[in-house]
Image (cartoon, grey):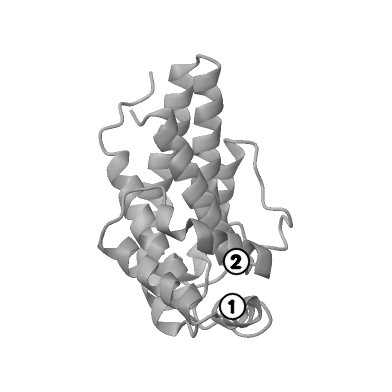
Amino acid sequence: MLTADELDDYAAALATLGRFHRQAPDENTLSAFGELLEEWPVPVGEASSAGLAHLRTSFAEAESAYQIRGDLNRLYGVSAVARVAPYESVHRDRDGLVFDQQTLLVREAYRQLSLQVPRLNREPDDHIGVEVDFLAQCLLRALDALDAGQDQQALTYLNLAREFLAEHLNQWGPDMLAEATEAAETEFMRGVCQLTIGTLDSFTAALEDLPAAS
């Protein structure tokens, strides 16, 4: 099983990426992220390397929080028609509608951690950023369980993350993120999309040998 330090590193990486898919960073957050860029905490493969390269370019070119916010808004349709829909149901359900079957299945997964989206029934549960953050929440629960000496409970949370990857995020996320990489106008959002693909790949591989919870 992953060590506590590895769980903490993946939780931090996934929480950061999930946030950036939903909310553009302000200048302070952007500056702090830039300082940590060379210390990305999880294993880096091809997609992650490409993402980090885009992000380094973003900082070298001094892309502003204003530029990134505008790109995020255009990309995911925050204030207009989305260039790339950020919702699982649009990509997987036959009619391509939000609040369809996949949205409800994702909602059920969240309930296993007693979580729900802040604007329930007004904001689709299956936004890419929310789904990525759900993995981080699974890891944080696993860490809490380990701290309490509840190894089997920790294993249950990790298996929930593995199941969610297999049944949801890995079914649509990589293709959608690749599309978003092409549609993005800023190096920052290209980097976030590519780094998310790579981090999901790395996390999936890290969970391959995870034993089933008893």
Mark closest to the chain's N terminus, 2 or 1 = 2
Q: Position of residue 183 (x, y in %)?
A: 44, 83
Question: For this rendering, which residue is in front, 93 or 210?
Answer: 210
Question: Would residue 100 be visible to someone looking at this image?
Answer: no
Tell me the quadrant of the picture where the C terminus can be found. top left
In which quarter of the view is residue 16 placed?
bottom right
Q: Which SS class for mark 1?
A: helix
Q: Residues within 10 Å of mark 1 (few under 14, many from 20)?
A: many
- Label ID, residue 30: 2
Residue 39, relative to residue 30: is it above or below?
above
Left or right: residue 65 versus residue 213 is: right
Number of numbered labels in the structure image: 2
Task: Decide if residue 121 is in sight here.
Answer: yes
**Which residue lies at the image location 55% right of the left edge and 60% below the top edge?**
33
Figure quadrant of residue 171: bottom left
The residue that appears at 50% across and 16% down in the rendered structure is 150
- Tell me the kind of residue under disc 2: Leu
Q: Provide the secondary structure element on which disc 2 rests.
A: helix
Q: Position of residue 180 (x, y in %)?
A: 44, 76
Q: Are marks 2 and 1 in contact (CB under 8 Å)?
A: yes
* CA neighbours of label 2 inside 10 A, class few (<14), some (14 to 19), many (20+): some
Q: Residue at x 53, y 66 (%)?
A: 87
Q: Is residue 48 above or below residue 179?
A: above
Q: State the image coordinates of residue 7 (x, y, percent, origin top left).
A: 44, 36
Residue under circle 1?
68
Q: Quadrant of the N terminus?
A: top left
Identify residue type, mark 1. Ile
* Residue 141 x, y percent position in the rendering: 55, 31
**Front tag of 2 and 1:** 2
The residues bearing labels 2 and 1 have C-alpha atoms spaced at a distance of 10 Å
Asked if residue 202 lies left or right of residue 62, the reply is: left
